[in-house]
Amino acid sequence: MQVQTRVEVFEMIFLVFLALGTLVGAVVIAYTLYNAYKYRDEGEPSDDDDVPTLGELPTGGTGGKKLFVSFGLSAIIVISLVVWTYGWLLYVEDGPQEAPEDAIEVDVEGWAFDWGFTYDNGVETNSLGEGMVVPADRPVWIEVTATDVWHTFGISELKVKADAIPGEVEETWFIAEEPGDYTAECFELCGPGHTDMDSDVTVLPQDEFDQWMDEQLTLTITLVDGEEEPVTDGFELSIEHQENAEFEQDLSATLGPEDFEDGTVELGDFEQGGTYDVTITPTDDEFEEIEDTIDFTGPTDETYELEDPDAEDDDDNDDGGDDE
């Protein structure tokens, strides 16, 4: 079965009900007009035995055949509609059975009065920044929750909505067929900032989304000395994800001066964001070892000053000499 978007499903249900409603309405109106014309009062007596007489109870009939046929057809149509609609609503609720491998997952978290988005590769955005960015024509599975009070996450144009309840997670999905800009809103009255609790939702073509994601997973590290001049030798830098053992990719690297250009290196090989431990070790005792933790959840630029411990001692001695 071809994967259909939620928008297509709801439009299909609407059009089917509209078409059947129009057909039934046309039949009822036509039959009413036919009987009105057939039994119109022309001011002359009629020889038709079926014509009712004023004040007389209807008689005759064919044993309720017309009633039985009309009731049977109505029941078949209504039951068929209920079963058909229920099946599509289950599809809307559970998503495509195929579960395409290229689907992406995004955790949505609401708080008063903003939204945060965390991708399955550790990249994080929020409504104060770029908002939610997703590729066009790909299923997007989202898990929605909240940190404070009840909220409801919804994108009207894409026919998606899910409650955001503290301590609970609600799953839903959507597919945006065309690139463009949409708006995610809160549909639960949650406080004085409720009307401003919205976020941009940007749908990009696949190649542009891949480029955007590569930009999010770019880590730039610069090394400078006490005079803010680039450090080009005398060090070794190691970096490793704190949960490296849980991923198939080796999220660690050891870099030397040859990997830097004018004291700067740009790392774009890591496909997973998160928390990384960084250690900068001197190879000639010209500075103290540096240990740091980087929260790498978007484009990150870190600068480290490699301090010469002897320089500080020299400054103290110089100060002492001046005092004398």
Image (tube, helix red, strand yellow):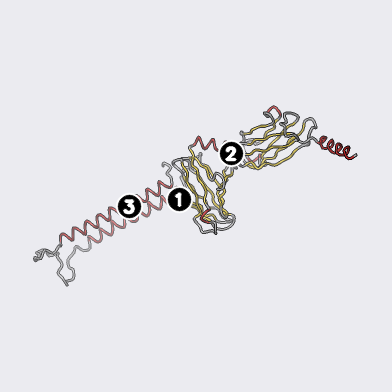
Which residue lies under the disc numbered 3?
A: 18
On the picture, is 318 further left or further right than 66?
A: right
- Residue 13: give x, y in percent of width and height: 37, 50
Q: Is residue 11 above or below residue 226?
A: below
On the picture, is 113 further left or further right than 78?
A: right
- The disc, 1 or 3, on the residue closer to the chain's N-terminal end is 3
Q: Nearer the viewer, residue 55 or 306?
A: 306
- Residue 282: give x, y in percent of width and height: 77, 33
Q: Looking at the image, do the residues carrying marks 2 and 1 touch, with CB atoms under 8 Å apart?
A: no
Which residue lies under the disc numbered 1?
A: 156
Q: Residue at x 63, y 33 (%)?
A: 267
Q: Would you call the spot at circle 2 few (<14 residues within 10 Å), some (14-19), or many (20 or more)? A: many
Name which residue type carries label 3.
Leu
Query: Which residue is most to the bottom?
Result: 55
- CA gap, disc 2 to disc 1? 27 Å
Q: Would you call the spot at circle 1 few (<14 residues within 10 Å), some (14-19), or many (20 or more)? A: few
Q: Quadrant of the C terminus?
A: top right
Name which residue type carries label 1.
Ser
Q: Nearer the viewer, mark 2 or mark 3?
A: 2
On the picture, is 315 further left or further right than 198?
A: right
Name which residue type carries label 2.
Gln
Q: Would you call the spot at circle 3 few (<14 residues within 10 Å), some (14-19), or many (20 or more)? A: few
- Residue 132: give x, y in percent of width and height: 53, 45
- The disc, 2 or 1, on the residue closer to the chain's N-terminal end is 1
Secondary structure of residue under mark 2:
helix
Which residue lies under the disc numbered 2?
A: 216
Secondary structure of residue under mark 3:
helix
Q: Nearer the viewer, residue 117 or 81?
A: 117
Q: Residue at x 66, y 32 (%)?
A: 265
